[in-house]
Amino acid sequence: MNQDNISTEIELYGVSPGIIAMIMFFVTIFSPFSFIPNMGMFGFYNVHSGIYGLFWIFANPYIFLPLCLLNLLYSYWIVKYYQAKSSKDGAILIGLFSILLPTVIVLSLTGLFGSFLVIYPIPIQFIVGLIILWRIEVPEVISPWSGMRLDLSWWKWERPKRKSDWDPFKEEKKALENEDSVNSE
């Protein structure tokens, strides 16, 4: 008895969530998250300031990994959004927390170490995620049932134009076309 394996995932039409995952993976791994100026005793600056990111925390991951967890969650949430499993607002909120929470944690621990310590966020990952969320449209569900492929060519409707596609000279172009058609007759 031959039994077909039917996929239980929803079929999506549009940008593959795998491409979004790959972009966010590389941005998360290679972009720095924050800048930490190393202030010495009595307000003198040491030469050793630091930029931390996920790729560079292999030396002491116990200190920096809790500060990077929300950055990993932000990338994961964007991928879930493009898989139609979460909302855009949730992804943006997690992105804001990934910038603000490490700064708040370090500011709350400032008095314990005897000197003023601050983290300046570098929001490269957050900005790339916002650009992806803003410019790349969410994939649409092709069919309500998995394993069912539909031919969309006959019923696909034209999407309305965005405000950014608005042409301020549209009426002038139509007037010029009308004049050309009148002159050619």
Image (cartoon, rainbow, N blue to C red):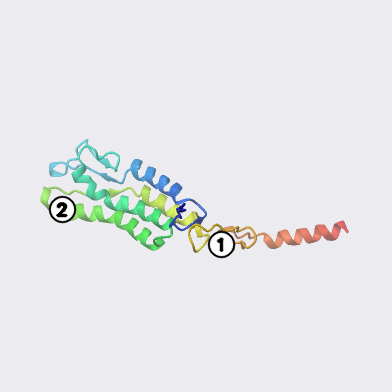
Q: Which residue position holds label 2?
A: 109
Q: Earlier in the sequence, mark 2 or mark 1?
A: 2
Q: Which residue position holds label 1?
A: 163
Between 172 and 70, the one lying in front of the other is 70
Give amino acid for label 1.
Lys
77, above or below 60, in the image: below
Q: Residue at x 23, y 43 (%)?
A: 37
Between 113 and 126, the one lying in front of the other is 126
Q: Residue at x 23, y 56 (%)?
A: 104
Give amino acid for label 2.
Leu
Q: Residue at x 35, y 40 (%)?
A: 30
Image x and y of residue 168, in percent: 63, 60
Image x and y of residue 103, in percent: 24, 53
Q: Is the residue under label 1 in contact with that under label 2 (CB below 8 Å)?
A: no
Classify mark 1: helix, strand or loop: helix
Q: Quadrant of residue 81?
A: bottom left
Left or right of residue 143, residue 35 in this image: left
Q: Residue furthest front?
A: 1
Between 37 and 124, the one lying in front of the other is 124
Image x and y of residue 80, in percent: 39, 56
Dot 2 crowding, Cα within 10 Å, few <14, some 14–19, many 20+: some
Classify mark 2: helix, strand or loop: loop
Dot 1 crowding, Cα within 10 Å, few <14, some 14–19, many 20+: few
Residue 89 numbered mark, or none: none
Left or right of residue 81, residue 169 in this image: right
Q: Residue furthest right?
A: 185
